[in-house]
Image (cartoon, helix red, strand yellow):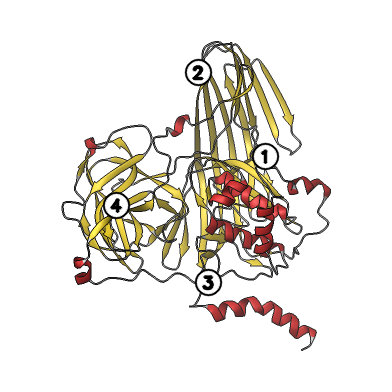
């Protein structure tokens, strides 16, 4: 075989592998194409109410700057930062990562302090074919980037467990794109999103398989840095404005909570710094991300939103802190399309098309649960309690006042950092849109109750749950309904909590398989249903919506509502 033919065969190896395995193997890698361009009028208001005899109050802010990459561009205009009352001191400085920091201080503040940041962000995401010939391993990394190969207490890139896993994941890899894609493919399936986690570092995420955005970022950075790939941590804000992407069978809608977020940027010699959100996207982030601060880890990127104070000895309590983020989209152009590939992780990973050598990761999907006929179901004895679902969410949290905890830095001197706890919830009683969440039964069940993570904002009426059969991956006919709950029976309280709906008066007996739950209502209740980023439990397309005027549940959501299924199964 001559050298030209050998080269041609190497280029076709990846394509041939996919064609041979179609129908046998599976994956949830989606190629995304098109773009987003928006003009965003952004404002952030912080209010700090001093407690007792506060001697000094200090705030710090990082000014967001314009940024360009092959896939994500941010332009900042009309920046303004104002205070009431005016601070006693103000300092402007730049740290060794290039972050522009504003520090302000008040002496003996006796009244609430308001800080308001405003700017216009023109954010653009461009998703076309990316060309990258960056080899793996990388060589001749510029000196000014070598800090981003460093281990830290949060990014334990020299730990043996991290190093061994990274080497295992990239066996046979010859390009940087292949290396980072394999790492992200593993992370997306290894991790599930929870907030707040016990710890935020890479090793905690590695060993426990769960965490928030900081854990995803730290674990990704640790694995990549251990292989000599520069990675920096980005802190910023995500905006709740949803956007929909066209697919062959309908729309897929993406939405983040409005609040603090952490992601990463990875260095490619031929592309420069390029953003990734390790929870779901590679080589890009959406233009709903506002990029603010960069560093080695989330212990270094602490300047934006930091609050420090000194109080008189013996004073109890801490300042009361609120933060409100608002974003108005004066222009929002979204033209995006998704195409599912037969490779990738079990959970959704979005990527633009990349012209680079890589070997797709594929897996064999598990067989569907085996159905049991009706006669056999009736003869089983249902005695063992069973509870399952997407059950992890922050119960009873007032998201307007999340901050801290306060840390004592010296005697009578304290600090509170920003945190990354964000309200992720959907208003599900609009009267215009219906929502449904899938659950998968692995064993027969006598269904007694279904719980949803809800917040009751008020209104009037009744609510209930419909149990719906699966019809080729979408909700079909209604099988049963729970008892009705009057809205005044659901407490109006802080945060989100379980509301359990009762099926026990006439409990349905369910064979293993897929089912859907939907919230029904009469009157005018105002209810939010909490959700988790990604799909901790169910399939990628297992959260659906449709207009009340349509029959087809053609819309899918990229998150998973929090729910729990409770009943009895057979021994």
Whole-angstrom CA distance, mark 4 to mark 2, is 41 Å
Name which of mark 4 and mark 2 comes first in the sequence: 2
15 on left or right of 271? left
- Helix, strand or loop under label 4: strand
Q: Nearer the viewer, mark 2 or mark 1?
A: 2
x, y percent for residue 544: 37, 57
Q: Residues within 10 Å of mark 2 (few under 14, many from 20)?
A: few
Contact between labelled residues 3 and 2, with CB atoms less than 8 Å apart:
no
| Residue farthest along the bottom direction in this orientation | 1
Name which of mark 3 and mark 4 comes first in the sequence: 3
Residue identified by numbered label 2? 317
Q: Nearer the viewer, mark 1 or mark 4?
A: 4
- Helix, strand or loop under label 1: loop
**Who is closer to the viewer here, 213 or 521?**
213
Residue at point 63%, 62% (across, down)? 181
Residue 498, above or below 440:
above
Residue identified by numbered label 3? 342
Among the 4 quarters of the image, the one containing residue 292: top right
- Determine if residue 323 is in view: yes
Residue identified by numbered label 4? 566
Q: Nearer the viewer, mark 2 or mark 3?
A: 2
Residue at point 27%, 66% (across, down)? 511
Numbered badge on residue 340:
none
Q: Residues within 10 Å of mark 1 (few under 14, many from 20)?
A: some
Whole-angstrom CA distance, mark 2 to mark 1, is 36 Å
Numbered badge on residue 65:
1
Contact between labelled residues 1 and 3, with CB atoms less than 8 Å apart:
no
Whole-angstrom CA distance, mark 3 to mark 1, is 39 Å
**How many marks overall?**
4
- Helix, strand or loop under label 2: loop
Contact between labelled residues 2 and 4, with CB atoms less than 8 Å apart:
no
Name which of mark 2 and mark 1 comes first in the sequence: 1
């Amino acid at each position: 075989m001559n050298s030209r033919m050998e080269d041609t065969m190497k280029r076709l190896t990846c394509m041939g592998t996919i064609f041979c395995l179609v129908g046998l193997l599976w994956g949830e890698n989606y190629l995304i194409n098109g773009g987003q361009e928006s003009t965003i009028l952004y404002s952030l208001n912080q209010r700090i109410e001093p407690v007792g005899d506060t001697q000094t109050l200090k705030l710090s802010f990082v000014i967001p700057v314009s940024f360009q990459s092959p896939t994500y561009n941010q332009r900042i205009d009309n920046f303004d930062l104002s205070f009431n009352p005016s601070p006693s001191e103000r300092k402007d400085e730049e740290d060794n990562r290039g972050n522009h920091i504003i520090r302000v201080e008040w002496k003996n503040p006796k009244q609430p302090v308001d800080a308001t940041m405003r700017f216009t962000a023109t954010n653009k995401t461009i998703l076309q074919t990316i060309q990258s010939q960056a080899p793996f391993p990388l060589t001749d990394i510029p000196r000014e980037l070598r800090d981003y190969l460093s281990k830290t207490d949060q990014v334990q890139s020299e730990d043996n467990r991290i190093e061994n896993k990274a080497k295992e994941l990239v066996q046979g890899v010859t390009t940087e794109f292949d290396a980072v894609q394999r790492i992200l493919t593993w992370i997306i399936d290894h991790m599930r999103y929870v907030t707040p986690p016990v710890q935020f570092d890479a090793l905690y995420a590695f060993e426990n398989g769960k965490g928030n955005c900081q854990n995803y970022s730290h674990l990704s950075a640790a694995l990549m840095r251990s292989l000599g790939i520069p990675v920096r941590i980005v802190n910023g804000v995500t905006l709740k404005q949803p956007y929909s992407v066209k697919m062959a069978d309908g729309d897929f809608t993406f939405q983040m909570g409005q609040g603090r977020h952490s992601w990463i940027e990875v260095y490619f010699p031929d592309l420069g710094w390029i953003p990734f959100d390790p929870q779901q996207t590679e080589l890009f982030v959406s233009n709903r991300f506002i990029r603010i601060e960069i560093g080695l880890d989330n212990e270094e990127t602490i300047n934006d939103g930091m609050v420090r104070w000194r109080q008189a000895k013996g004073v109890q309590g801490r300042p009361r802190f609120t933060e409100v983020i608002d974003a108005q989209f004066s222009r929002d152009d979204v033209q995006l399309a998704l195409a599912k590939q037969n490779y990738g992780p079990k959970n959704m990973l979005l990527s633009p098309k990349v012209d680079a050598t890589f070997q797709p990761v594929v897996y064999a999907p598990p067989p569907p649960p085996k159905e049991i006929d009706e006669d056999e179901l009736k003869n089983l004895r249902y005695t063992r309690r069973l509870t399952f679902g997407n059950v992890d969410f922050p119960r009873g949290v007032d998201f307007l006042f999340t901050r801290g905890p306060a840390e004592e830095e010296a005697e009578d001197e304290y600090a509170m950092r920003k945190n990354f706890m964000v309200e992720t919830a959907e208003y599900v009683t609009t009267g215009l849109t219906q929502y449904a969440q899938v659950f998968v039964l692995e064993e027969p069940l006598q269904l007694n109750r279904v719980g949803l993570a809800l917040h009751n904002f008020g209104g009037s009426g009744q609510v209930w749950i419909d149990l719906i059969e699966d019809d080729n991956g979408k909700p079909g006919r209604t099988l049963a309904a729970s008892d009705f709950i009057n809205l005044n029976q659901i407490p109006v309280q802080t945060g989100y909590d379980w509301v359990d709906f009762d099926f026990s008066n006439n409990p349905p007996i369910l064979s293993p398989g897929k089912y859907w739950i939907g919230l029904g209502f009469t009157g005018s209740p105002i209810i939010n249903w909490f959700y988790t980023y990604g799909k901790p439990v169910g399939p990628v397309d297992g959260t659906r919506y449709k207009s009340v005027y349509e029959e087809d549940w053609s819309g899918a959501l990229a998150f998973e509502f929090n729910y729990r299924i409770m009943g009895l199964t057979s021994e």
